[in-house]
Image (cartoon, helix red, strand yellow):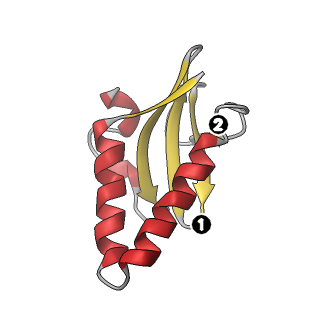
């Protein structure tokens, strides 16, 4: 089992780094490192996340790290990270949906 990041998810991570980095590059790097650590736990336990309520697919799951939803698709040979989105954002307004891109 391996982890792969989609381009939108990588872009989300870069946006988070830029936002936090305005105040502190150190804390931005540290925060992203902790997100990556949370994601790496999926290698051993890909089913640990909950189903994404907005998605109607059983294999679209998410883990929550602080105020961020990390959505992923659990497949037989990989875990595809779809997006890292702040929990306060209304996902119903986002088009296309993160699970529609991959």
Judging depth in this view, the residue of 44 and 70 nearest the camera is: 44
Q: Where, quadrant-wise, is the C terminus in this rendering?
A: top left
Query: Which residue occupies 60% across, 41% down?
Result: 40
User: Where residue 70 sits in the image (x, y, percent)?
Assistant: 51, 48
Q: Badge 2 is on which residue?
A: 42
Question: Sequence-wise, which precedes: disc 2 or disc 1?
Answer: 2
Q: Where, quadrant-wise, is the N terminus in this rendering?
A: top right
Q: Is residue 72 above or below residue 24?
A: above
Can you tell which quarter of the image residue 21 is in? bottom left
| Tag in front: 2 or 1 | 2
Residue 88 visible in the shown view: no
Query: Which residue occupies 56% across, 15% down?
Result: 77
Q: Is residue 18 above or below residue 5?
A: below
Distance of mark 2 from mark 1, alpha carbons?
Answer: 17 Å
Name the side, left or right, on which 92 lies relative to 40. left
> SS class of the residue under badge 1?
loop
Q: Is residue 39 above or below residue 5?
A: below
Q: Residues within 10 Å of mark 1 (few under 14, many from 20)?
A: few
Name the side, left or right, on which 65 lies relative to 32. right
User: Where residue 14 sits in the image (x, y, percent)?
Assistant: 30, 57
Q: Residues within 10 Å of mark 2 (few under 14, many from 20)?
A: many
User: Where residue 38 sits in the image (x, y, percent)?
Assistant: 62, 50
Q: Badge 1 is on which residue?
A: 66
> SS class of the residue under badge 2?
loop
């Amino acid at each position: 089992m391996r982890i792969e990041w989609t381009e939108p998810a990588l872009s989300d991570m870069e946006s988070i780094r830029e936002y936090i980095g305005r105040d502190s590059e150190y804390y931005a790097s540290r925060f992203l490192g902790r997100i990556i650590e949370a994601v790496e736990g999926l290698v051993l336990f890909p089913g640990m996340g909950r189903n994404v309520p907005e998605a109607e697919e059983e294999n679209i799951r998410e883990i929550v790290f602080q105020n961020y939803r990390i959505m992923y698709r659990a497949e037989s040979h990989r875990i595809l990270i779809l997006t890292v989105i702040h929990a306060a954002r209304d996902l119903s307004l986002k088009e296309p949906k993160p699970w529609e891109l991959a």
